[in-house]
Image (spheres, rainbow, N blue to C red):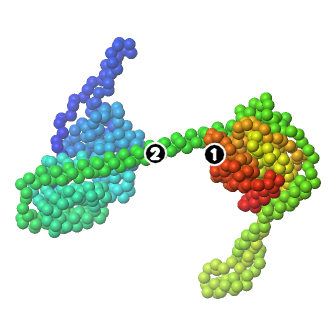
Amino acid sequence: MSAHRHVQSPATTPDDGADLARWDDDGAPPAQPRSSPDAWLRVGAELGDRLVDLSGRQDLLVTCRPGTRSGAPAAFFPTLGEVEFDARLFAPLKPHEIHPRIVGDEDRYPAAWGVFVHEAAHAAHSIWTAPAGTNPRVVEAALLLEESRVEGAHLITRPTDRTYLRTSARTLVMPDIAHPTLQGIEHAAGVAALVLGRRDVGILDAGETRAVADLCEKVLGANLLATLTRIWSAAHQCADHDATTMLVHGQEWCDALDIAAPALPVPENLTDLLSGAVGVVMDSTAATDAADLAAQAAATNAMAVRSTAQAQDRAERAGQRRKAAATAKSVFNARGATVTPDGTPAPYGNPVTGTRRPTAAEQSAAARLSRALRAAAYRERTEERTTSPTPPGRLNMRAALARDAQRAAGSVPTAEPFTHTRRRNSPTPPLRVGIAVDVSGSMRAACAPVASAAWIVARAAALTDPDSLTATIAYDRHLTALTRPTHRAPERVTTFDANGGHHNLGDAIDALDHGLELSRPGAGRLLVIVTDARYDSDETAQAVTRVKQLTTAGCAVLQLTLTPKSHHLPGTTLLHLPQPSSAPAAIATAATDAIRRTR
């Protein structure tokens, strides 16, 4: 029972003439390409190009036409070096719609491509030929075993073709079952070889073939089925050129059937039973393939959705960075003017009341903070020790003796007696501190201590490291820079008042982030927010989003509050100060911790 015995195809259609030329303006519908044997020549040529990749052979010809000489959907002729292919497998596609040369085009006709892959497996692995005079029945049995053997061998080199080989099983096996050339027990044995043999090489799953396995065990008996299973399993291990071994397995197949067949009763409706069981198997494989395809499509769609979401997120982040840059440029202006969220000068509401000279206490606090920051930023020198078989370096006598012993023993010396120590200075990290102070009416008590803290931190940072930067922004509805990102220490303390309304912490954080690079690693980074956080929902959401981005980037965020009625901004470290005058010390401690944690 060969898998290439299929229903005879009707005669091929005669050649169609070329389409008549039409004028563009004759009003008739456009001419549709017609299917003819000549039109399939290109498809056959492109299949031949793909056959090189599938089989590894460049000496084969592929002919594609409606109907085949063998009557099978496809066939491989070893002596002719030809693979013939029935063009009707591509239905309902027309030849001008089929482009096998394009990788991926086969997904539009998986059944046809599965049959083509099966023939490619024959072309690559069915290399043996039976000697003249061999018993035709033995050859037929060997060819039956060859069906699953070549597919298993093909999967070893091209495992991704499994999906197509599963599809081809429905095209190749079912016609053999419905129109058998063998009868009785041999028919059931052939079905077992075609279906269960594909199970054992990994084409079909065990659960999918259970219906055929149960029926064949009932018809053939457990002993005969086990014997046949052993035979096709041994054939699966046979080499491609080993005709002798394949014919031996074919003879074993025939002998096993001849011995067991007389004692086995044959059900009257065996063909119908086998057709039904194989139909269940094919339906199960089709359902599994459909489920896998749906799962793959869902995964592809999910990936596309995720990719789109990531692209949108990147676009939003880029837009936010551009907006933050514009906001920082407008806020840190040379005039010290108050600006609106869109960067235009605010007509009123500047909280700055003037400047004053720093007090002796503030100057002492700045000096102490500078010393503390330098101590926190100090990094010990790193040491790197390397060994080598030759100088320079310090001689290790134990390793030297071990090397002499290895050389005396005649082995290749592996001991390295010289040790070299390299010491490197670790760079001192700079400091980035941004202070955002709420100047709405409820924060009036924080004005004086925060003004003092801003000057102290800015002065200390400038004295500690020339690369350190600090900045302070007062925010209500508008934004005002109290100190700007500069390497120079401020000479005077900027005083301000709190009499504004509403809040704009989100834009204040954007300006500080861009001006001080708070999201960029490599420095001790700290954002201090002095606020009672009594915002509406939109203001809170915008602030929390910015805080989360900064904390994710490794920037410490500290919220200072002055009253028990203050709210906590999620994501920040909350520090309640019953005495506003303790704000400078709290900010100084947080800045010292931030630079100490920097690596």
The amino acid beneath tag 2 is Ala
Q: Residue at x 75, y 40 (%)?
A: 440
Q: Is residue 128 visible?
A: no
Of residue 510 and residue 48, the one placed in the foreground of this image is: 510
Of residue 252 and residue 493, the one placed in the foreground of this image is: 493
Q: Considering only vertical position in the picture, is 7 above or below 219?
A: above
Quarter of the rendering occupied by the N terminus: bottom left
**Picture quarter containing residue 214?**
bottom left
Of residue 243 and residue 276, the one placed in the foreground of this image is: 276
Q: Which mark is residue 233?
A: none
**Picture quarter containing residue 346?**
top right
Image coordinates of residue 494 in percent, x first then y, are: 86, 43
Q: Are marks 1 and 2 in contact (CB under 8 Å)?
A: no
SS assignment at label 2: helix
- The residue where tag 1 is placed is 545
Q: Residue at x 72, y 55 (%)?
A: 575
Left or right: 399 with respect to 260? right
Image coordinates of residue 514 in percent, x first then y, are: 73, 43
The amino acid beneath tag 1 is Thr
SS assignment at label 1: helix
Q: Residue at x 48, y 45 (%)?
A: 303
* Real-space CA distance between mark 1 and mark 2, rounded to the nearest whole angstrom: 25 Å
Q: Is residue 597 visible?
A: yes
Q: Considering only vertical position in the picture, is 249 above or below 511?
A: below
Q: Considering only vertical position in the picture, is 566 above or below 20?
A: below
Instruction: Choose mark 1 or mark 2, whichever is in front.
Output: 1
- The residue where tag 2 is placed is 302
Q: Residue at x 71, y 44 (%)?
A: 509
**Sequence order check, earlier mark of 1 and 2:** 2
**Picture quarter containing residue 599?**
bottom right
Q: Residues within 10 Å of mark 1 (few under 14, many from 20)?
A: few
